[in-house]
Amino acid sequence: MKTGKKLTLLIAEDDVDDRMLITKALTESFSQAVLRCVENGEILLQYLRREGKYQDDVKFPFPQLILLDLNMPKKDGREALKEIKSDNLLKKIPVIIFTTSKHEDDITVTYNMGSNSYITKPGSFEGLLALGKELEKYWGNTVLLPA
Amino acid sequence: MKEIKSYTIITLALIFLCGSISVYTIYRVNFLNSESKTTEQIIRITNDLQTKVLEYEITILSFATTYDSVFLDSMSVIRTKMDLDIEDLSNLVRDNEFQENRLDSIRSLLVGRHHVFASSIMNNPTAEDLLQNVRINRKTNYLRFGKRIREQTDAILIQQREKLMERDLGVLTNLSALSIIILTITLGGISAAVLNFYSIYQYNLAQKASDQEIKDYQNKLKIQIEQLNSTNKELEQFAYVASHDLQEPLRKITSFNDLLQDQYKDALEGDGKLYLERIAYAATRMRKLISDLLEYSRAGRYAEDKELINLNAIVNEILDDLSIQIEQKNALVQVDKLPEIFAHQSDWRMLFQNLISNALKFSKSNEHPRLRITYRIAEKKTVSEYVANNSPNMAFHHLEVRDNGIGFNTEYANKIFTIFQRLHGKDEYEGTGIGLAICKKIVERYGGTIFATSEIGKGSSFHILVPFEQIPNDQN
């Protein structure tokens, strides 16, 4: 199934364990994706705006897709989302909210702010693997992404 | 209040007494007035009689001096008049023995006087003789008749005058007695009225005091309710946050455990693999507990955003979700026409989800599960028996979920709605013991009640009673 071309997936996640589990699972099940991680919203925006060390296009390729945790220190997911969606250069990038929260308010608010998906974190590694497959199937092989 | 009543009764009684005494006095005074009129008449006629007696004497003297028969005629006229006077008097003094006796003696004295005069005319045929005779007997006749008649008439007059005075005094006594009585009664009335007003004042004071007490109590209660509400909210918030945050590390335990099992199972020796399985099982169970707790804390949380929901649609959705289980167990589900109610969709979904999945879970192994969901308007008797603080004119929906499952001992009919309360071992029937507690919480949030009836081996019935009125913004 690995037919589509590579795409860069940027993961914004503050939790070390989660970053480890997500990258491990996605490396296995979403092999089409090149994975990069940032720890909070502030760094996420630095990455996107090519600030500091993120000017390096080879090490830090510009992402086609963002996986965004909502609850993070410094700048949280909501603020980061708001900034991304109000930035003319960044707003085309699809943002997938990836959180433990099932709160109706979070769902509605983030969609209103322009997020493209809302996924709650699976409770097991197998769940993560399955999710990776889904992501590959949809974002990798089904939809067309902006250049 | 009791005092006010008795004082009012006393006042009314006094007024009535006053009235009757007045009427009686007026009657008495009238009576005495008519009596004194009679007396006055008697006095007048007696005086008249005295005058007539003198006139008679004078006429005798005139005849004796003139010997003119004119005087004889006037004598007869006077006599008739005197007889009439006496007749009148005897009518007026009819019930007075003394006065009657006196009249009798006057009568006979007058007769005697006339006889003496007539015999002196007979015995003295000439004018000189007669005059002589009259002159000689003048004193004797006066003493024999005139003076005695005068004595009798005076006696009559004296007695009548005394009577008149007596009666005047009677009227006076009556009147002064009346005024004293009226004064006394008025004083009594006034004091009763004062007491009455005082009692009313006291009553009002007491009323005010108790009103204040009730108000204070209400305020206290309000504060306590507010405190309770906020504590409740805090607890719910706590449970929500706690269970939410608890899920984080648990998710990782599960995930890393998965990784271990997946990637290093061959490296493990002996019971190592079994231990990993036990960790996985415990973590799964813990996750279920936490998520149920989370649901419990969220159940019935929403007071706003209620809408008109169709219970049939909700039940159908749940049956759809459970279709695999239903098919596996070969269960027969029958659903009545259910009402539309004004509520939160997620609450009622959770409620029926729990009840229906319970009915499927606790089915008998040797019998196909049969499930019936019925609806009726609750009977007044059922409501008053099960709903605390129900008002008599409030109508309730009565929903029932009945199964033919294993049932339970009715001894535990209330216990099963307590959180973490289970009647069966975890290995027998899976579950956390939160489902029915959630149901209870939801139903109570809607001002209703849930209760269960059962018979071991025959099945259970879960009854939901919720009030009809589900007006927006009515409940908190």
Image (tube, coloured by chain):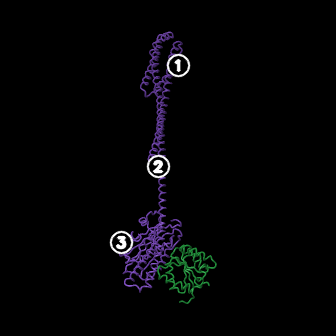
Chain colours: A green, B purple
Task: Inspect the image, locate mark 2, and give the three-letter code of the amino acid beneath it.
Answer: Ala
Foreground residue among B232 and B264 = B264
Q: Disc 2 marks which residue? A: B206
Which comes sooner in the sequence, label 3 or label 2? 2
Residue at 43 percent of width and 85 percent of height: B264
Foreground residue among B423 and B276 = B276
Residue farthest to the front, as pictured: A53
Whether residue B115 is situated above or below residue B321 in the rendered picture: above
Dot 3 lies on which element?
A: loop
Dot 1 lies on which element?
A: helix
Foreground residue among A80 and B291 = A80
Q: Which mark is residue B409?
A: 3
Direction from residue B419 to residue A93 in the image, left or right: right
x, y percent for residue B16: 47, 41
Whether residue B388 is situated above or below residue B287 in the rendered picture: above
Chain under numbered label 2:
B
x, y percent for residue B314: 49, 75
Task: Inspect the image, locate mark 1, and give the three-letter code of the amino acid beneath it.
Answer: Ser
Q: Which mark is residue B74?
A: 1
Point out the frontmost of discs 2 and 1: 2
